[in-house]
Image (cartoon, helix red, strand yellow):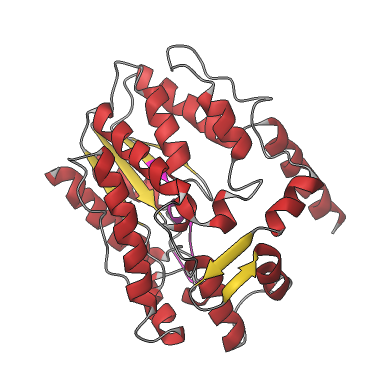
């Protein structure tokens, strides 16, 4: 227990000192300058997921490398349109380009309050630091910039934020988290699992959501970057969602998807619809947890579909 506590403290200190998006951006910059990048992968946590059921835990970036050549990833939990747009703006100042760009987008990482407003996985400090980077012609400093530092007051303000979801109506982040905190790993009581799906995917996406403008900016940056790009919808476990909200869940998330694709299309006329890979419950890490995280079979399906799309782009 003491060793685990020490490791946790070390990780927390590292995350406070070393900014993850900036660090990965610098590695991508180095790879591009060296001419050692075939594909640039801009990814959310679906690119880092595996299941305890897996006998093969090869992650999505490595699977794509097996199919497409050298893949350099800029990916992490909560990574969304803001980080991707800024990264492309910065890397676009280099003359070197990959052969293709892949972007995986979970709907909630770009527009949902519980992620975008979070003082850690919303990456407010990282986004501010990225905005101050003029370009990629010089090494990008990632130590002592950005990071996951936040104050108790910032967390309290986050928890007090109002959220309106389709199935719970008006609530707050704090009220959702109060009901979900300390519940451990699945299986959960059915009402708790239902609440988790509503918290993760049920928030109503309104036309004035600031994330839609950021998605348009991402589309613009992809267009200006000038290489073939494949966008991928990081699909949630729709079958399980439909079990909780029959005849409603899939229509709801696809309605959100259309709004986000429309926002991307304003910025890019060539990106096309996000790739929608057909997945079953067994293709997820655990469909009960409502995450866009995939098992080995799911990762293979996604990797194959992405590779086919890149080759035909």
Q: Is residue 313 above or below residue 292?
A: above
Report whether residue 195 is seen. yes
Span colored in magenta: 42-55
* Residue 199 sits in quarter: bottom right
The quarter in which the C terminus is drawn is top left
Q: Position of residue 157 (x, y in %)?
A: 72, 51
In the displayed structure, does residue 25 sit left or right of residue 277?
Answer: right
Residue 45 visible in the displayed image: no
Q: Position of residue 82 (x, y in %)?
A: 46, 39
Residue displayed at 42% across by 56% down = 106
The structure residue drawn at horizontal position 71% and vertical position 65%, both measured from the top left corner, is 174
Give yes or no for residue 51 being in the magenta stretch: yes
Query: From the image, which quarter does the N terminus lie in?
Result: bottom right
Mark count: 0
Residue 258 position within the rendered picture, expressed as x and y whole percent measured from the top left: 29, 60
Is 233 or 14 nearer to us in this picture?
A: 233
Q: Please indicate whether residue 151 sits to the left or right of residue 74 in the image.
A: right
In the rendered image of this protein, does residue 140 appear above or below residue 281?
A: above
> For residue 190, what is the image quadrant?
bottom right
């Amino acid at each position: 227990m003491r060793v685990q506590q020490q490791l946790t403290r070390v990780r927390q200190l590292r995350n406070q000192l070393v900014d993850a998006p900036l660090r990965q951006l610098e590695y991508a910059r180095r790879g591009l300058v060296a001419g050692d990048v075939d594909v640039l992968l801009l990814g959310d946590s679906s690119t880092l997921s595996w299941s305890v059921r897996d006998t093969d835990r090869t992650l999505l970036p490595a699977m794509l490398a097996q199919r497409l050549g050298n893949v350099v990833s800029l990916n992490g939990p909560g990574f969304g349109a803001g980080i991707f747009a800024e990264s492309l703006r910065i890397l676009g100042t280099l003359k070197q380009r990959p052969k293709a760009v892949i972007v995986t987008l979970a709907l909630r990482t770009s527009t949902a309050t519980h992620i975008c407003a979070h003082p850690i996985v919303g990456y407010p400090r990282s986004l501010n630091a990225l905005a101050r980077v003029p370009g990629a012609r010089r090494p990008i400093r990632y130590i002592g910039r950005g990071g996951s530092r936040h104050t108790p007051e910032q967390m309290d303000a986050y928890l007090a934020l109002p959220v309106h979801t389709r199935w719970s109506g008006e609530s707050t982040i704090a009220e959702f988290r109060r009901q979900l905190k300390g519940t451990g790993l699945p299986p959960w009581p059915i009402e708790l699992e239902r609440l988790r799906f509503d918290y993760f995917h049920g928030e109503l996406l309104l036309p004035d959501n600031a994330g839609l403008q950021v998605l348009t900016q991402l589309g613009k940056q992809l267009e200006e970057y000038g290489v073939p790009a494949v966008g991928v919808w990081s699909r949630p476990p729709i079958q399980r969602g439909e079990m909780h909200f029959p005849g409603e869940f899939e229509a709801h998330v696809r309605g959100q998807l259309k709004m986000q694709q429309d926002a991307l299309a304003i910025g890019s006329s060539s990106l096309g619809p996000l790739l929608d890979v057909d997945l079953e419950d067994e293709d997820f890490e655990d469909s009960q947890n409502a995450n866009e995280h995939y098992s080995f079979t799911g990762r293979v399906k996604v990797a194959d579909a992405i590779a086919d799309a890149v080759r035909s782009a």
